[in-house]
Image (tube, rainbow, N blue to C red):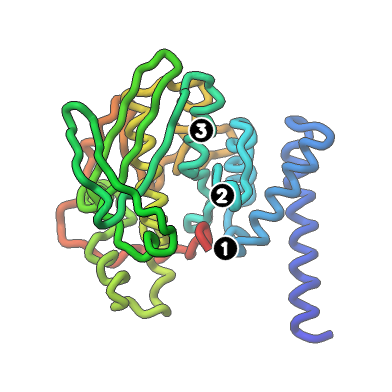
């Protein structure tokens, strides 16, 4: 048998083994078509991201069950939530679209949106009146080529209450650099300038490196909703367990949280060590945005 054939056979064997493990774990929790769909989604997630194969299977199932409990899809296309490898365990990570989905389902939000603002579009922002003046470039192709200068998020509740917030990209970068243990602004700049060899990119597995804009969307929505929005039970649970490793008892373990906003909208007073930054600890490269 060729090496390709052996690899395919081994992959199929691992998939069957994983499927049996997952099925056994959830047999008393999910029934019928829901169980079958759940097993398929977990196996698919591991197949798409081979780095998950080295993670504890228990944490993979726990992360997937958290998403299932929120009735969110693990499909990377939908972007509701992701099962992401961190060292030898799997994290449950909510996508910014997951936040929007949970907000809509609560029935309390008439409108909710988040958008990047590009160079030349921002005409003014009044933080007191929370009024933004922009002129969005209609040519999508032209717009995509322009640098991002900031991020805007807003919501309107069904009772008419409105709230909006704007952060410049510089503020967002400083926020990530200050509070995310897995992110270094200095390294981020080097990556943007092409100064980090591709052979070393596996060291920079934080989502802030993989897709800064999507992490910025998530950060701003989380900040906006947790401080001023109406939070359903599902939303509270999602915020509590976002970016955590969930053990078999459903207890979240905070090993490396990229989002440290508290429910009152403030940020944790536990900042990163002010000592000189070191190179990020090597960890499996996540394929979240690939």
Mark 3 crowdedness (10 Å alpha carbons): few <14, some 14-19, many ≥20: few
Say which quadrant the N terminus sits in: bottom right
**Residue 61 image position (x, y, % from top left):** 64, 44
Q: Residue at x 80, y 42 (%)?
A: 36
**Residue 252 image position (x, y, % from top left):** 48, 36
Q: Which residue is mark 1?
A: 51
Q: Residue at x 65, y 57 (%)?
A: 46
| In front of the other: 226 or 19 | 226
Mark 1 crowdedness (10 Å alpha carbons): few <14, some 14-19, many ≥20: many
Q: Which residue is mark 3?
A: 251
Say left or right for 64 vs 191.
right
Marks 1/2: CA–CA distance: 11 Å
**Residue 28 shows which numbered tag?**
none
In the displayed structure, 140 sits above or below 31; it is below
Marks 3/1: CA–CA distance: 23 Å
**Residue 83 shows which numbered tag?**
2
Q: Residue at x 55, y 42 (%)?
A: 80
């Amino acid at each position: 048998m060729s090496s390709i054939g052996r690899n395919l056979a081994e992959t199929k064997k691992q998939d069957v083994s994983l499927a049996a493990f997952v099925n056994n774990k959830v047999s008393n929790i999910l029934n019928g078509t829901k169980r079958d769909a759940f097993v398929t989604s977990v196996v698919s997630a591991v197949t798409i991201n081979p780095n998950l194969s080295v993670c504890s299977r228990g944490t993979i199932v726990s992360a997937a069950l958290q998403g299932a409990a929120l009735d969110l899809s693990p499909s990377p296309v939908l972007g509701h939530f992701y099962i992401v490898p961190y060292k030898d365990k799997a994290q449950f990570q909510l996508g910014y679209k997951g936040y929007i989905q949970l907000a809509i389902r609560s029935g309390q939000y008439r409108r909710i949106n988040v958008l990047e603002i590009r160079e030349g579009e921002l005409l003014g922002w009044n933080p007191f009146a929370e009024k933004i003046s922009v002129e969005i470039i209609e040519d999508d192709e032209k717009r995509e080529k322009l640098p991002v200068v900031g991020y805007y998020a807003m919501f309107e509740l069904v009772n008419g209450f409105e709230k909006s917030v704007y952060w410049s990209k510089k503020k967002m970068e400083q926020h990530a650099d200050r509070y995310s243990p897995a992110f270094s602004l200095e390294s981020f700049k080097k990556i943007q300038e092409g100064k980090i060899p591709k052979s070393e990119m596996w060291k920079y597995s934080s989502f802030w490196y993989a897709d800064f804009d999507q992490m910025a969307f998530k950060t701003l929505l989380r900040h906006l909703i947790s401080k001023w929005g109406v939070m359903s039970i599902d939303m509270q649970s999602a915020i509590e367990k976002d970016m955590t490793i969930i053990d078999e008892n459903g207890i979240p373990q905070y090993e490396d949280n990229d989002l440290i906003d508290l429910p009152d909208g403030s940020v944790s007073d536990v900042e990163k060590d002010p000592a000189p930054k070191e190179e990020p600890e090597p960890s499996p490269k996540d394929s979240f945005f690939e």
